[in-house]
Amino acid sequence: MPIIVQKFGGTSVADSGKILSAARKAIRAYNEGNQVVVVVSAMGKNTDLLIDLARQIHERPPAREMDMLLATGEQVSVALMAMAIHSLGHEAISMTGGQLGIVTDSTHTKARIRSISTDRIRRALDEGKIVIAAGFQGIDASSDITTLGRGGSDTTAVALAAALGAAACEIFTDVDGVYTTDPRVLPEARRVSRISYDEMLELASAGAGVMHNRSIEFAKKFGVPVHVRSSFSDSPGTMIVAEPESRSQPVCGAAMVKNEARVSVMGVPDRPGAAMTLFSKIAAKNIAMDMIVQNVGDDGHADISFTVFRDDLPATLTAVEQAVGELGAESFNYDDEVSVISIVGSGMATQTGVANRMFHALAEAGINILMITTSPIKISVLVARAAATEALQMLHRAFGLEQQPSCRGARPQSAGAPVVNGADAMIARLQGMEDLIIEGIALDETEARATIFGIPDTPGLAARVFDQITAGGIVVDMIVQSFSREGQANLSFTFPKEDLAQAIEIAGTLAKQFGCPPPAGCPQVALLSVAGIGMRSHTEVASRMFQSLTAAGINIEMISTSEVCVSVVVDGKHGRKGLDALREEFADVIV
Ligand code: ADP
Ligand code: ASP
Ligand code: MG
């Protein structure tokens, strides 16, 4: 009999009426001939209330006790949901994470699932019971209760679907699917019928809170089709699968992380390994860095800037302070009034002028771009928080996201049809279900780099640069705009190396107009990329990359991080050596 996993989020089980209505959905799936596992979150805002309560007692509660506390939220819901199903005349059994057989590592409040032993669940299902699973929790090797991080019930649901080889994983929530951006922020947002794993991964980590990003790592890794739909209606929802909705449309969605903080370390000695010391200290605290840019000065010193969630700022600053001391860097500063806005789409990998359109839309609204980073299917900009919502709105409009795209180029895929594919083989190959997987390490030696130094900090200049560059027929690949030190930023970009002379000429003219010194060009750079699943949530990937390149004596000129790939630009003469170093470094996790 096929197994169906259904997950109900907090709003969907917020009161007894909603619990009963969710119970009816589960019974309907059962009566349609399925074995049913229901994953539930804590009721309504219970997790928030528990966190508040803990903070009233202790400023920084011990993480183990925090997990003990937070897990109770889900325990309440599973018991009530099982009672609801009983009251409607069906058999059900509730289980906590430990009873479900979900074993995690011991990183309290951010634990990763290592394994799921499904024997007990299967026995209960075979006895005709509906299994009610507590989301967001597990136990570690010492039987201590752990939680998976905020929003983690999605991850429980997709992981259970993978481990059970479920026919479908339905995420019931308070919206009727995945939208082009948060519909609560922009009412004109459009529901997408389908979105690819990679796009959803990027959007989720760029702030689209509808899905926990790690749940999509599971879905992609184990081939679980995820159906996001409304708890309160029968509308069709959104399928998260391998193929995007459209390949002809460059952008499928936009998202913002409103509460970010920028941290800049100034005057870092410009030698291999400096960035690594800094990043490894932050990674060791399990803090994911978002945008990372560095600005190589001509005085033998570099400025490094990056962004983190604002909540992670205190811990980040502790790590930065240590690193500054060790490195002998000049100083550091931060701004906790910034937001990151990203646009995402599989189509942008093959289309030109997407970044340009983004910068234009922001320029027209007079919004200043503080930093820029790009990756294969995502472009992010850092803006002042006060301008963030307007920036999101401008970008949504500029890319016509409210309109239905043509489906040219995307293969049709029917909702709910495929069964989880290949999960067993993948589970058998991994030590832990959430282990890092590297799918490929690549070297691209076809590009050159140009850098314009000291661009004034005024809205619209990035748009002017890329207008001219695009008008010259030059296809830009990676773009990085560093944080400006004294109101001035450096803008670096890569492009096919045969276009070097023309790019430098255009950049030179612009530099003169902006009152900047002459631009620099590197006739051949090596672009080294490590692609895989969970590249950002596994915070050690970037630092391992930097470490191995450093050990090989290679200096990093540009950095780009995303969920699907971390890339660096290094001097062209170091390409092969860099590739070998990375292959050796990741030999244990490459598939
Ligand atoms: P649940 O409690 O069911 O897990 P969440 O609050 O975690 O629900 O996620 C649903 C919410 O995610 C929606 O109410 C919506 O405001 C928000 N959201 C953010 N980005 C998006 C998006 N791109 N599409 C749909 N919803 C989004
Ligand atoms: N209850 C947890 C939270 O609020 C987990 C979840 O809802 O997914 O974060
Ligand atoms: Mg959620």
Image (tube, helix red, strand yellow):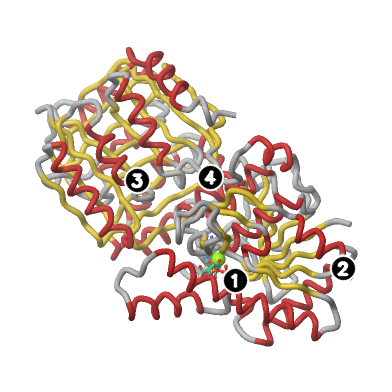
Q: Relative to 529, does residue 327 appear above or below in the rendering?
A: below
Q: Alpha carbon of mark 4 to alpha carbon of mark 1: how far? A: 30 Å
Q: Is mark 1 within 8 Å of ligand 2?
A: yes
- Residue at position x 36%, y 54% in the image: 340
Mark 2: amino acid: Gly
Q: Position of residue 274 (x, y in %)?
A: 22, 33
Q: Alpha carbon of mark 4 to alpha carbon of mark 2: how far? A: 43 Å
Q: Relative to 525, does residue 100 appear above or below in the rendering?
A: below
Mark 3: amino acid: Ala
What is the count of numbered marks? 4
Q: Position of residue 57 (x, y in %)?
A: 33, 79
User: What residue would you read off at disc 2?
Assistant: 128
Label 3 crowding class (10 Å Cα cut-off): few <14, some 14-19, many 20+?
few
Residue 192 placement, left or right of 274? right
User: What residue would you read off at disc 1?
Assistant: 41
Residues at circles 2 and 3 in contact by the CB criterion of under 8 Å: no
Label 4 crowding class (10 Å Cα cut-off): few <14, some 14-19, many 20+?
many
User: What residue would you read off at disc 3?
Assistant: 284
Sequence-earlier tag: 2 or 3: 2
Residue 363 placement, left or right of 146? left
Residue farthest along the front direction in this orientation: 142
Sequence-earlier tag: 4 or 1: 1
- Residue at position x 31%, y 50% in the image: 307
Foreground residue, 323 or 449? 323
Mark 4: amino acid: Gly
Sequence-earlier tag: 1 or 3: 1
User: What residue would you read off at disc 4?
Assistant: 345
Residue 295 placement, left or right of 531? left
